[in-house]
Image: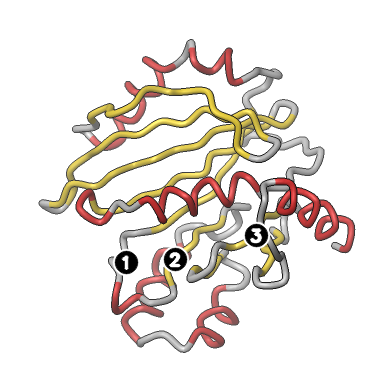
Amino acid sequence: MKRVLALLLVVILSIGLCSAEEYVAYINPILGYAFYIPDGWIAVDYQNVADVLAANGGSDQYNQDITNWIGQMEGTPYVILFQKEYENASFYTNINVTMQNIGEELTVADLLLYNDQIKADLTNAFGNYTEIYPLTQIQLGSWDTALSQGEYDMYNQTRTLMQARFFKGTIMYEVTLTVLKDELTDLLQNNLGFIVGTFYAPDLTITEE
C-alpha cells in the first residue's frame, strides 16, 4: 500500500496540484488499482459500503440508494463515486471505474478505429444513445486516453455519459461520468480528468469468466 500511495503522490504532483494532503486515496481491495478521490465525493465498493456510509452520515434514503446500487457489484473489482452532498445533487450523478481484459495489447490510436462498434454497443445498451463527441485522443496525467461523450434517455430524463478509456497491458480501464444533461458542469468534467490523471494501475492479469 505504501508503494501505491507513493506512486499516486508522484502522479498527482505531476499534474500540477499544490497539495496531495487534502485528498484521500482510494485503493481497490481486489486488484490494487488506485486513484485520488476528488473533493466532495465518496468512493464506494461492495466491501467498504457499510463503513463509508456510516462515516458519511447521509440520509437514510441516500444510504439505501447506494446500498442497493452497490449490491449489484458484489464480487467485482469495480467502484462507484457519489457526491457527498446528496441533498444538493442528483443521485444519478456518479463516476464509476471498471476494467476488462481485452486479450491483446492495444493503444488508444487502435481504439479510435473501434468508435463505431463502441457507439453501437452503447446504443444496444441504452436503446437511444446519441453520440455527441466520438472517441478523441487526449493526455490525462501520464495516461494516453480516449475520451468520448454521448446522451441517452431514461425515466423521462436525458443523461450525459462521458467516458475515458486507457490501457495497461491487456487491461482496458473505463472511467465513466453519468450526469443529468442539465447538470453537467466543467467541475464534473474536471473530476473525471482528476481520477484518470491520478490513476495507478498495477500489472494485472484478469481472467474473463
Asked if marks 2 and 3 touch (Cβ < 8 Å), the reply is no
Q: Residue furthest right?
A: 3
Viewer-closest of 207 and 133: 133
CA neighbours of label 2 inside 10 A, class few (<14), some (14 to 19), many (20+)? many
Residue bearing mark 3 = 36
Q: How is the image coloured?
A: secondary structure
Viewer-closest of 4 and 127: 4
In the picture provided, is 76 more to the left or to the right than 41? right
Residue type of the residue flagged with mark 1: Phe
Is 139 drawn above or below residue 65 in the view shown?
above
Within the image, what quadrant is residue 124 found in? top left
Quarter of the rendering occupied by the N terminus: bottom right
Residue type of the residue flagged with mark 3: Tyr
**Mark closer to the chain start, 1 or 2:** 2
Residue type of the residue flagged with mark 2: Phe
Residue bearing mark 1 = 91
**Mark closer to the chain start, 3 or 1:** 3
Q: Residue at x 22, y 39 (%)?
A: 152
CA neighbours of label 3 inside 10 A, class few (<14), some (14 to 19), many (20+)? many
CA neighbours of label 1 inside 10 A, class few (<14), some (14 to 19), many (20+)? some
